[in-house]
Image (cartoon, rainbow, N blue to C red):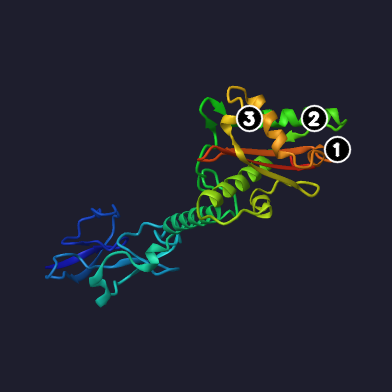
Amino acid sequence: MIMEWRCTWCGKPHDADDPPCDECGHHKFERAIEQLNESDGQDHGPVWACTECDREHQKHSPPCSRCGNAQLEKRQPQYDELDDLGGTSFVDVLEPKYAAGYLLVAVLVGSLALGVTGLITVPFVGSPDAPGHAESYGNLSLDSVEDAYVEELNDRRTAEDASAVSSGAALDDAAAAYNKQWVRSEYGDADDPTPRDAVNQHDPNCNSEITFAPHATSSETVENFDVQNESAVARGLQIFTLGDPNELLEERYDSIGVDIHVAPDERIFVTVFVCNGGAF
């Protein structure tokens, strides 16, 4: 099929000099003989190519859909064997809208990996659960026992003319990380915990050296305590955890982190961190 006229703006072929163009609305045609490809029946007239990245467009509709350049120039299309493959090219995949998505996925995957390894703290990502009870035992809230433990310790500090210590979120997290790893190593095949790893993972920002006091009851289980009274349990645990009664009573401390965990055999694991400046 022979088309004798085409739009001078968008290059759309027409069979008569009868503006406006039904493609772009332009009112000027020029005489041109364009041979349609009889094999596919489609018009292979001029295309508009980006002057920056050479991406071809069927219409003069800047900006370029690939790079955003506002300059398009009219060219005759270049065909080669690769055109038969069709689909999205590698360069198309690198368009900004795709690149932004790939970058976001890479950041999320990297953050999750660092969170799992403990190099950074990521919400909802942390160490696997330890066997036993971390939040409660029966009607006994272990969080309340931890709070009562701090209150009992402060009563003892007051009796020694030392100022009270305050719970620090990062110190609590460090104590929990150490304590749970300790339980996993005792009742599974996990590695033994180290205080340095727990502290580095949660960075409590202490101004002084951190004192570390872990303890696990040997024969005494949670049933040896008055499990209806958090303060009584905390008071009983003070007897077992303070191997050196003076260690946690020194005036230089003002921050504390405590974690209490009941193991599967009902032994109680307690980890305490104290320092100066870590209560935030």
Q: Residue 145, which numbered label?
A: 3
User: In terms of secondary structure, where does tag 3 sit?
Assistant: helix
Disc 2 crowd, CA 10 A, few/some/many (<14, 14-19, 20+): some
Distance between mark 3 and mark 2 Cα atoms: 16 Å
Comparing labels 2 and 1, the label whose residue is closer to the camera: 2
Disc 3 crowd, CA 10 A, few/some/many (<14, 14-19, 20+): many
Amino acid type, residue under disc 2 in the picture: Arg
Task: Work out whether mark 3 precedes mark 1 in sequence or the reverse, and give the earlier one.
Answer: 3
User: In terms of secondary structure, where does tag 1 sit?
Assistant: loop
Amino acid type, residue under disc 1 in the picture: Glu
Q: Quadrant of residue 72?
A: bottom left
Left or right: 141, with 200 as reference point:
left
Residue 175 visible somewhere in the drawing:
yes
Q: Residue at x 41, y 61 (%)?
A: 66
Judge by depth and name the residue closer to the eye, 65 or 133.
133
The residue under label 1 is: 251
In the figure, 234 relative to 181: above or below?
above
Q: Position of residue 163 (x, y in %)?
A: 84, 32
Distance between mark 2 and mark 1 Cα atoms: 12 Å
Amino acid type, residue under disc 3 in the picture: Val
Q: Position of residue 242 (x, y in %)?
A: 74, 39
Q: Quadrant of residue 85?
A: bottom left
Task: Work out whether mark 2 precedes mark 1 in sequence or the reverse, and give the earlier one.
Answer: 2
Disc 1 crowd, CA 10 A, few/some/many (<14, 14-19, 20+): some
Judge by depth and name the residue closer to the eye, 15 or 124.
124
Q: Residue at x 56, y 30 (%)?
A: 223
The residue under label 2 is: 156
